[in-house]
């Protein structure tokens, strides 16, 4: 999607009762998230002019009442990825880091947060596979997923996120090849502390069969190293015995 399509969408959404939609967005997030520390106690909903939602903790707006970013880092929140985000149609930044969120990320994540440029879900308990659908959050320039419980392989399609400047999946349980990012270079600290990630900037990938055959070769080499002297000795023995 081009930037002009994006702007067009934002313009259209401002003529279609977007403020009520934005209120509903925050209302459903609040109902979907467990908040044992009552960090969202300022999120009190009322009728009329919706500009009050912009004074909620963690919420920033543009154009008086459109939610632009939601930054809720370290508030002790729990529960699953809040699907109500769907209604914050102007959202460009989402930070849920350092909470206790858990469960899998929705596979349709791109339809929930299509214009987000910063997505920080680090230091939670999210699990399951990292969804391929993230490739359709095309404006992403910061994607922080470190210190969760993600498993499986990284979708190779993540390499097509052309704006990505900051990226980490460190401290998860991921395996398999690192996507071949062209534009940006991410160091090994972006991939550290996983079960078995391989390929640049980590160690080269060795497929399992190759591992076995290498092991076999190594066995043969060790065998040769052990038996060659024995063979030589036997040869010497029989030669001299004659
Ligand atoms: C909403 O209220 C604020 C102040 O409370 C005011 O500045 C703004 O113009 C109002 N917006 C609308 C659309 O009525
Ligand atoms: C997460 O939950 C555990 C127990 O359920 C609690 O001990 C811990 O403090 C929580 N962490 C945060 C960051 O809220
Ligand atoms: C990404 O978007 C394209 C075009 O809208 C769609 O065909 C494709 O299924 C989406 N991919 C994922 C993994 O959601
Ligand atoms: C990897 O784990 C070690 C030991 O727990 C920790 O000190 C280090 O900061 C971690 N690195 C990253 C990039 O998460």
Image (cartoon, helix red, strand yellow):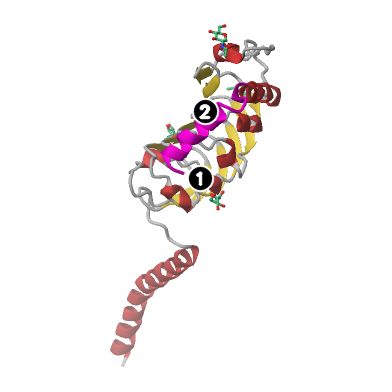
In the image, taking residue 183 as reference, residue 23 lies left or right, namely: right
Local SS, label 2: strand
Q: Which numbered circle lies on residue 136?
A: 1
Query: Outermost residue, bottom direction?
Result: 242
- Residue at image position (58%, 28%) is 88
Q: Would you place residue 207 above or below residue 77 in this image?
A: below
| Residue 118 image offset from top left, x and y in percent | 46, 31
Give the class, few, some or many, for how many residues have Cα within 10 Å of label 1's Cα (few <14, many ≥20): many
Give the class, few, some or many, for how many residues have Cα within 10 Å of label 2's Cα (few <14, many ≥20): many
Name which quarter of the figure residue 102 lies in: top right
Instruction: Specify which label sits upstream in the sequence, 1 or 2.
Output: 2
Q: Would you place residue 4 above or below residue 213 in this image?
A: above
Q: Is mark 1 within 8 Å of ligand 3?
A: yes
Q: Quadrant of ligand 2?
A: top right
- Residue at image position (65%, 22%) is 20
Magenta part of the chain? 1-19
- Depth-wise, is mark 1 or mark 2 nearer the camera? 1
Query: Outermost residue, front direction?
Result: 15
The mark total stands at 2
Front-most of 79 and 6?
6
Local SS, label 1: helix
Residue 71 in sight here = no
Q: Is residue 103 magenta?
A: no
| Residue 119 image offset from top left, x and y in percent | 49, 32
Q: Quadrant of the C terminus?
A: bottom left
Front-most of 138 and 166?
138
Q: Is residue 7 magenta?
A: yes
Front-most of 231 and 18?
18
Query: Which residue position is annotated with label 2?
Result: 94
- Residue at image position (54%, 48%) is 132
């Amino acid at each position: 999607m081009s930037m002009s399509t994006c702007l067009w969408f934002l313009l259209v959404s401002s003529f279609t009762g977007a403020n009520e939609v934005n209120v509903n967005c925050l209302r459903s997030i609040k109902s979907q998230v467990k908040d044992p520390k009552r960090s969202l106690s300022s999120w009190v909903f009322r009728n009329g002019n919706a500009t009050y939602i912009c004074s909620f903790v963690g919420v920033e707006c543009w154009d008086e009442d459109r939610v632009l970013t939601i930054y809720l880092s370290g508030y002790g929140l729990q529960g699953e990825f809040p699907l109500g985000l769907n209604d914050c149609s102007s959202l460009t930044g989402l930070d849920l880091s350092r909470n206790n969120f858990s469960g899998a990320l929705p596979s349709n994540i791109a339809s929930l947060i299509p214009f987000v440029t910063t997505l920080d879900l680090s230091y939670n308990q999210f699990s399951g596979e990292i969804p391929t659908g993230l490739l359709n959050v095309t404006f992403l320039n910061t994607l922080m997923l470190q210190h969760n419980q993600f498993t499986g392989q990284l979708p190779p399609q993540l390499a097509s996120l052309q704006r990505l400047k900051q990226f980490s999946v460190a401290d998860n349980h991921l395996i398999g090849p690192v996507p071949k990012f062209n534009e940006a270079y991410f160091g090994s600290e972006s991939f550290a502390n996983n079960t078995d990630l391989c390929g640049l900037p980590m160690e080269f990938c060795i497929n399992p069969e190759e591992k076995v055959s290498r092991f076999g070769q190594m066995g043969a080499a060790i065998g040769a190293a052990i038996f060659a002297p024995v063979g030589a000795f036997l040869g010497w023995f029989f030669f001299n015995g004659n």
